[in-house]
Image (cartoon, rainbow, N blue to C red):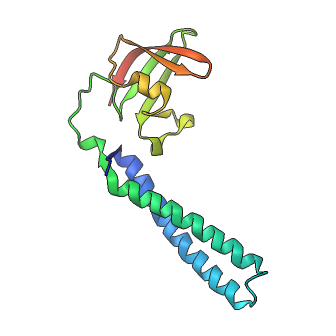
Amino acid sequence: MQKLYISREGLAKMKAELTVLNERRMKVAVAIEHARSLGDLSENAEYHSAKEEQALIHAKIKDLEDKVTRATLIDDLDIDTSRAYQGATVRVRNGKTGQEITYRLVSPPEADLAAGKISVQSPVGKALLGKGPGEAATAKVPAGDLTLEILEISY
């Protein structure tokens, strides 16, 4: 069983989503029972729609339960804070444009580019891992090579 390194915030978010999905699952079960009471199931669109939603919810629940089971909090790990690892906030300068950008390195389920959270499995995330301030990281992105100078790392 492979560990999933995640922040407390990410784990709490997954648990909250799991709670919402379990509540939704109960409502869908009620909808299925109601649709069954309407009679012929072969041409019952409500029934088929509810069964499809139930299957999707069950798949999401199973996936989230697996992730929560494998979760290891990165907050509890003893890591070298002078280097960029998962959980780090990294301020970088784009080598071509000179623009400064701040990223937070997170696990894949926590990634949210709009919030500045990038996955450690993304090309930029992989390039930054293990690097320290003053070092350059080169990521292979669809637009070509992206060189980033690491300015600051914080946890």
Q: Is residue 91 above or below residue 55?
A: above
Residue 55: horizontal and vertical position, in percent? 58, 68
Residue 79: horizontal and vertical position, in percent? 23, 32
In this view, the residue farthest toward the left is: 78
Q: Is residue 65 above or below residue 75?
A: below
Total numbered labels: 0
Residue at image x 36%, y 11%?
135
In this view, the residue farthest toward the right is: 43
Residue at image x 29%, y 48%?
72
Residue at image x 32%, y 47%?
2
Residue 31: horizontal and vertical position, in percent? 65, 80
Task: Report the quarter where the C terminus lies.
Answer: top left
Residue 132: horizontal and vertical position, in percent? 32, 17
**Left or right: 114 with respect to 1?**
right
**Left or right: 54 with respect to 38?**
left
Is 21 in front, or is 138? 138
